[in-house]
Amino acid sequence: MASGSTSDSTWGFAATLAKDLQAAGQAVHMAPLSAFAPHSYTAAQRIIVMTATWGDGTAPTTANGALARLAAAKPTVPLAVLGFGDRSFPAFCAYAKDFEAAALANCWSLLLPLGEVDRQSDQDFARWGRALGAALDLPLTLAHRPVAPQSLPMTLVSRRAYGEAVQAPAAILHFAVPQAGLWQRLTGRGFGKFQAGDLLGIAPEGSTIPRFYSLASCSADGFVEIAIRKHQGGLCSGQLINLQVGQSVQAFVRPNPVFRADRTRAPLILIGAGTGIGPLAGFIRAQGDRRPSTSGSARATLIRICSTVKSWINGPMTDSLLDCARPFLAAVSGITCRMLCAKTPSPCKTSSQAGPRSWSVAGAT
Ligand SMILES: Cc1cc2nc3c(=O)[nH]c(=O)nc-3n(C[C@H](O)[C@H](O)[C@H](O)COP(=O)(O)OP(=O)(O)OC[C@H]3O[C@@H](n4cnc5c(N)ncnc54)[C@H](O)[C@@H]3O)c2cc1C
Ligand SMILES: Cc1cc2nc3c(=O)[nH]c(=O)nc-3n(C[C@H](O)[C@H](O)[C@H](O)COP(=O)(O)O)c2cc1C
């Protein structure tokens, strides 16, 4: 069994399958997909690949290089591929699909067609397990009990709420950076260093499946900042929007290396919508003073897309997110914030101010 994972949950599913296979008298070897080496599995009778998809349809961390290895390998025993993903992403289970397509193109035979597990659904997994059991003639039940990821308690130190008046609650939350004990630091379970654009995983009460939020701050800022909006009927966003100063949530950080401002000195153009502005404000805060300003051009331009009147009214949240960057803006003159509103009444508000600590807002329909 070869697993491709970034935030480890796929390993838990793989362990459940391994346990059931062993209970049915099978010997199981488990490895990360990045170490995929089919020619060396001389005793193997089948290969099962279980892989998540990350980024925008790309390989998870422990699957790096696996497609190239597959392309270079001669087909051996029959293969089954199970994809883990989230249907809210456009490229649902794309990496698992790519892996299966590459195997077929390379003449591998399949034990059964590609399986898909949406948002770590134990029902999807059990359904695929029944199909696998039928193909192998083994009784597989795959009753998976997800284990919540290792996390630390993180305390809210301030909150600013927006959008209540237009029934679109949103908030900027500041947390104290959790202090890890010596043992947690030694075992790599502390919070560690983080950058704007990395992901804050929050384990909501009542679910073992974490939700991810884009970090708007970096560890050098000394606080953890996220911008959230409430999803109707949503578990985690509901708990976060109601969180009061002094209360805590269980959290952890996952690096998100595909979401970074580049390291050059060229002016930045950042485009975002809604709470997606959060990490972009973090990029400006962290990098603005490294970008030289040539006359007439901004060091950073932030374009905020508003698709509805509600998101236009939520403009004050963007103002506040950039406000957090103000201490840093002293050295970052020439930041421009441009709001593009798809469905707002025309003309939109336009204002501008001069001075090193100011930024201008221009609207267009
Ligand atoms: C990489 C990444 C970054 C993100 N960054 C941010 C960010 O910075 N800010 C932010 O606000 N969000 C962000 N999100 C979204 C966030 O992770 C959550 O998805 C969001 O907060 C909703 O979680 P929830 O627990 O409130 O909703 P959930 O409980 O997961 O529910 C989501 C929706 O599905 C509906 N639903 C739930 N269960 C069922 C069911 N059984 N049948 C039918 N419908 C159901 C709910 O009513 C709700 O509308 C990000 C997501 C990703 C993947
Ligand atoms: C930043 C990020 C990007 C993701 N991209 C995709 C994607 O493009 N397609 C998809 O189907 N799922 C995507 N997912 C969902 C993961 O594949 C899914 O949560 C999976 O179960 C995670 O498995 P893991 O914990 O083993 O890494 C993404 C999740 C995150 C947090």
Image (tube, rainbow, N blue to C red):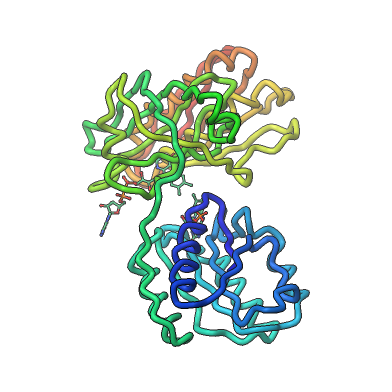
Residue at horizontal 54%, vertical 67%? 50
Vertical order, 205 against 129 (above or below): above
Residue at horizontal 33%, vertical 41%? 204
Vertical order, 98 against 292 (above or below): below
Q: Position of residue 150 (x, y in %)?
A: 46, 40
Residue 214 visible, this angle: yes
Q: Where is the N terminus found, in terms of image quarters?
A: bottom right
Residue 365 visible, this angle: no
Vertical order, 38 against 282 (above or below): below
Q: Position of residue 362 (x, y in %)?
A: 48, 31
Q: Position of residue 62 (x, y in %)?
A: 63, 56
Residue at horizontal 72%, vertical 78%? 42
Q: Where is the C terminus found, in terms of image quarters?
A: top left
> Based on the displayed image, in which of its 4 quarters is residue 24 positioned?
bottom left
Q: Looking at this view, is 104 or 139 the one in front?
A: 139
Residue at horizontal 40%, vertical 42%? 306
Vertical order, 362 against 83 (above or below): above
Q: Position of residue 181 (x, y in %)?
A: 51, 24
Q: Is residue 341 found left or right of 181 in the rendered image?
A: left
Q: Residue furthest right?
A: 72
